[in-house]
Amino acid sequence: MKRVLILVEGQTEEQFVQQMLKPHLLSFSIYTTPVILKTSDASRGRGGVSKYTKVKGDILRLLQDTNATVVTTMLDYYGLPKDFPGKTALVANDPYQRVAFLEGAWAADIQDARFLPFLMLHEFEALLFADIEKLFEVIPGVSTSVKNTLRQLAQQPPELINDGENTHPAQRIEQHISGYSKVLHGVLVVQRVGLARIRERCPHFHEWLSKLETI
């Protein structure tokens, strides 16, 4: 049994790993353990990367576990701190090229073959847009106009819903559905969406999970 440590941003991502990724990867003889960032306010369900130096410290600490086959991450691309490796050198406009560049710079900074960096485009809520109808099942009473607005948005690849202050995936949901809570609803919705649909619509996530399946 291979062992994978996943550094996650907060309580919702921790639940996602425990309830969805762990059972899936066990079928590949891979045991996963989520670890919440020390910089996260997990008690209130909030994550967040405040300074890269603190994130790096968490990663290096996890890499000290010699029983870990791989140390990977599940952190948001949205809201990365200014001191994140490669961020000041970003030039590409394509989100997939940008995230690949940052992940490469991150790996180069850590310098450990067991480290597999992964940044979610652009954050956890993008996964909900893989099948937005499941959100309406979990949160009843959403108006038809709001449903149609979110359906229109969900027609594009979820990972391309951008990272602007007012246009990142979580904000898109929260500005239309005031009762939405990431901690209360996030994993419930994603469980209904299912890994197969997420992988179909989120190629960057699919690529990461495929790498984990073959370690």
Image (cartoon, rainbow, N blue to C red):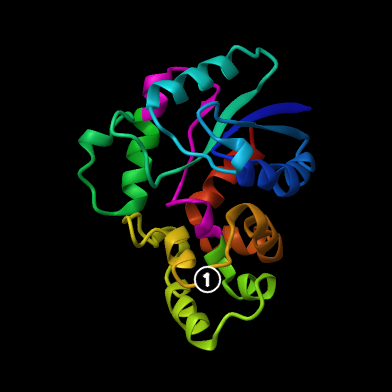
Q: Name the one closer to the observer, 63 or 61.
A: 61
Q: Position of residue 134 (x, y in %)?
A: 65, 71
The mark tally for this picture is: 1
Residue 143 against residue 9 in the figure, above or below? below
- Can you name the residue that lies furthest to the bottom here? 144
Q: Position of residue 141 (x, y in %)?
A: 63, 81
Residue 113 within the magenta-colored segment of the rendering: yes
Q: Residue at x 21, y 35 (%)?
A: 89
Q: Residue at x 52, y 68 (%)?
A: 178
Q: Position of residue 132 (x, y in %)?
A: 57, 72
The answer to whether residue 109 is left or right of residue 193 is left
Residue 23 seen in the current view: yes
Q: Position of residue 206 (x, y in %)?
A: 56, 51
**Which residue type does callout 1 highlight?**
Ile
Q: Name the one closer to the observer, 150 or 115.
A: 150
Image quadrant where residue 85 sits: top left
Q: Name the one closer to the observer, 66 or 183.
A: 183
Residue 214 within the magenta-colored segment of the rendering: no
Q: Residue at x 47, y 59 (%)?
A: 170
Judge the density around disc 1: few (<14), some (14-19), many (≥20) Cα neighbours within 10 Å. Answer: some
Q: Indicate the secondary structure of the residue bearing disc 1.
A: loop
Image quadrant where residue 130 sits: bottom right
The quadrant of the rendering that contains the C terminus is top right
Residue 152 against residue 75 in the figure, above or below? below
The quadrant of the rendering that contains the N terminus is top right
Q: Residue at x 37, y 51 (%)?
A: 96
Q: Which region is colored magenta? A: 106-127
Residue 113 seen in the current view: no
Q: Name the one closer to the observer, 203 or 6.
A: 6
Pointer 1: what residue? 177
The answer to whether residue 207 is left or right of residue 188 is left
